[in-house]
Image: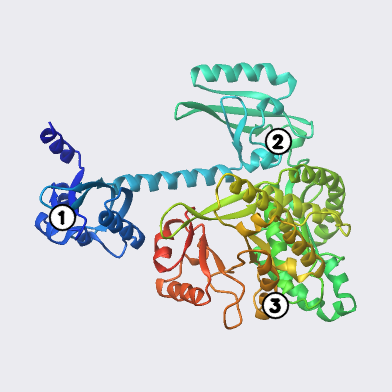
Amino acid sequence: MLDAVIPALERDGLALVVIASTDRRVIDANAVLARVSGFAEAMLRERGLALLACPDSDPATLARLDAAIAAGSELRDEICWARADGTRFWFGFTVIPLGAIAGGGPAVLFMGRDITERRRRDREDATIQAVLTEVFRNLDVAAAVIMPNDCILVANPAYAALTGYAMGELPGLSVDRLTAPASLEEARSRRAEQRRTGGRYRMPLLLRRKDGSVIPVLIHAVAVEHEGTRFRVVTLHAEHGHDAASPERRLVVGQVALIRLDPLRAAYGERWAQVESRLMMLAESVIKRRLEPGDVYARTDSGGFAIWFARGTELDNADRIAAITREIRIRLVGEYGGEHAPGVTGHAAAVPADGIDVPPDRATLVSTLMERLAARQAELRAQVLAELEQALAAPRVVPERLISAGGGGTALVWMTLAPELRRRIEAAHALAGETTAGLPDHDIVLLGAAAEQALSALAAGDRTPAALPVAYETFAAAARRRGVLAACRGLPAPAREILTPVLEGIPSGTNPVRLMEIGQELAPLFSSVGLMAEGAALPDLPPGLGPFTLIVFEGAALRALPEARLGRLFGEARMRRLRVAVRQAGPQAQRLARLGAQFLGVAA
């Protein structure tokens, strides 16, 4: 019976090779591997699997394969090999121990097949998925995917803006909550019919926004099947005849922002007159570089900046203003020589645009629009603080799993605060003005949430190390530094053994001695302390070994670097005893591992 099975497996493209464990010699093989690789069977028998290795073959995978053959142990893996003509192909394989075979020593059965086409399809599917996700997120039309239980699975920013909810509040929300009573019966009937038939429908709907207001929209729903489950993709179109959607009366979502530098002026005191021109020029250079065509900015009388964003949703522009203010803080913290870090905050909000020419001139921006923003911020303050209090009851952390370059599973977890929570903390500080006492520090919130996750993992028997960013600017202010260090000391000892704080946002030109001082303050509290690279270079450090043991790079910053430069960069890190981690390495993970990176985030 087996004599009939083996030719059938060969016709199906399954390669079968018997290999001696002692010398890796090919004892017997069918014709599949020769056919796939283009090498003659005699050459494969003579030189073994080593004939197929090439520069693109992962050294760690080659080592695992050789060890499995030598030890006679099981292994399942994939590897990139070279054909006789030099082209590359991917091979999925399994090693099965056979024990001692007749007339010889121990051997293994190596079997597998060419998976190049499957990997190509997987890459295409992933690319299509990524493109569709970006299209969905950036559609000007309000769109959402609805689960069979009539709750939202995911929605885009335009949907959030139209309904008045934050992006983080929409997943899991019942669409009945968004439907005014007058439309509820018909909407439920049309949804039930679509579940039965799988068709599509279009109907007028009275949309109930988060603030209780009701606006007329047109809803278009299409049924989509995925793995046996029927979802609905819906789009909402505001009726143009309604006041709330009329261009003359609508709220301009996220268009106006204020960056406040007056706390920085107060910190400098009498020295402000000497440094104002230089620091304002630094801040202005950041704003100019970050703004897009059509955006308008102007200096305000209070010594800050007003910005009009020409496009984007409220969430998009909240993220943009947070990124701008963060970069300004990083630039200015390197310039400030006192005991207080630069107090720079920013906030974007929706304001009424009636009576305003678009885009506004600078005079209108710093007068009329800033007055409207101030009124809007007063309304938002209580709402933002209430939402923040609720979010802090169970702070959400976003993990990124970094695998070991030597193989195996997750070797390091990178933890950050959920974007919506970080945004709420930034907004609370911006809206609080000078009364920021009692507001949470995002670094302390992240430390506490990460410690809870670490303790839960330990209780489940998982001792995977975790790293988390801590802002360098936190340590530039004496009060914030004391607060963060006190929070670190208050963490349970088992959590501190797992966690590695990583200094991020290190300004260019930072005194290396200052970096070492901060590292020496943190090192006694944790088993490891790290640094976040700004771009494709190590931070300036004094000669010799210091308290830091980890350097973290962003994958995008390394993508265009030639291998020779990457090799030197990683070599310098090794000389300083710094383990190298790369977040969101994506397709370059194999190259980075070969050049010396030890932890790799496989996401792109």
Q: Is residue 310 visible?
A: no
- Would residue 226 be found to the left or right of residue 296 on screen? left
Q: Quadrant of residue 270?
A: bottom right
Label 2: which residue? 163
Of badges 2 and 3, nearer the viewer stands 3
Which of the two labelled residues, at mark 2 and mark 1, occupies the earlier sequence position?
A: 1
Please determine whether, in this image, residue 528 is positioned above or below residue 273.
above
Label 1: which residue? 26
Please report the residue visible at 77 percent of the width from the left and 49 percent of the height from the top. Answer: 349
Farthest bottom residue in view: 543
Mark 3: amino acid: Arg
- Would residue 471 be found to the left or right of residue 231 on screen? right
Of the pair 395 and 585, the residue shown nearer to us: 395
Q: Quadrant of residue 566?
A: bottom left
Label 3: which residue? 514
Of the pair 287 and 61, the residue shown nearer to us: 61
Q: CB under 8 Å between callouts 2 and 1?
A: no
Please determine whether, in this image, residue 2 is positioned above or below residue 419.
above
Mark 1: amino acid: Val
Tell me the colour scheme of the image: rainbow
Give x and y (percent) for residue 581: 52, 63
Please report the residue visible at 74 percent of the width from the left and 72 percent of the height from the top. Answer: 333
